[in-house]
Amino acid sequence: MPHLSATHLSVTSLKPLLPLATVKAEQAVFSPNTSKDIASKNQSVLWKQNFASSGLNSTQVRFAHTDIAKVPDFSAYRKDSVKSPNARNQQTDLPRKAFTYLVVGGGAVATTYSAKSVVTQFVMSMAASADVLALAKIEVKLGDVPEGKSVTFKWRGKPLFVRHRTAEEIEQERQVDVASLRDPQHDDDRIQKPEWLVLIGVCTHLGCVPIANAGEYGGYYCPCHGSHYDSSGRIRKGPAPLNLEVPQYEFVDDDTLLVG
């Protein structure tokens, strides 16, 4: 019965290798780097591959006794435009590029919109609420403050002094030598209208609340540590280092003052 035999031969020199495999039925001879089909009268045997490796002193021949593995067919997943081996790149690249650009562009727009929404919500969460914004500003009716008096209001949790100054007080504060003050500041730099003085009623020493229309200079006096302010809110005597703070304000009309 036809059969195949393979031999292993050791070679001690670098001479050309002799044939290593023969088929007795047909007397077919193979070299180490050759693959042939072997057929017999009664049976046809298909030899798919012949593997050979050689070194300085040995040579080995190995045959694969199984059919060649089938290559997976991915034709169902390929685009029709790329199935033809004769198609030029210009004919196949453009549709694929257009689809890629469309996907990337759509993803970029969606990502940008989502990021914008997240950032907007985060910023709005840190914004002041409606009740806080309502307390951020205060309107004062100037008609409720008589001339020569100082009225105290509450603004942002602090006392707010609104003083209606007389002509004598205005002239007196304008004649003060600025160079002699601990915190030099002219009266005109602390007011918008000469007759109206707006101050935050917190002593600059240790945060006490001064008393209006008191002290040696007729302005404000802090009884806690003896700081005296004039009718422009400037420190004139005592431990306070700075003048009373002037907040941001504006006159909406002749009878309305908006602070904040």
Image (cartoon, rainbow, N blue to C red):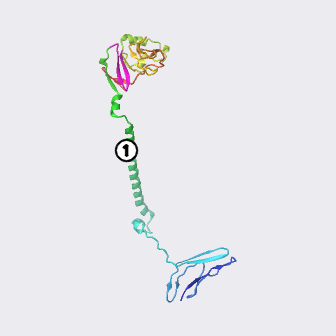
Quadrant of the rendered structure where residue 222 is? top left
> Which type of secondary structure does the marked residue at label 1 adopt?
helix
Q: Is residue 156 magenta?
A: yes
Instruction: State left or right for residue 52 relative to residue 238.
Output: right
Residue 39 colored magenta? no
Q: Which residue is mark 1?
A: 117
Q: Which residues are magenta?
A: 147-164
Expressed as whole percent of the image width and height from the top left, the position of residue 28 reads 57, 85
Is 24 left or right of 186, judged from the image as shown? right
- Residue at 34% x, 31% y is 133
In the depicted structure, whether residue 3 falls above or below residue 170? below
Residue 33 sits in which quadrant? Answer: bottom right
Above or below residue 10? Residue 26 is below
Which residue is at the front of the view, 180 or 78?
180
Residue 231: give x, y in percent of width and height.
40, 14
Q: In this picture, is 85 found above or below 47?
A: above
- Amino acid type, mark 1: Ser
Please name the residue shown 55% across and 86% down the image: 3
Give the dominant element type of the magenta stretch: helix, strand or loop: strand
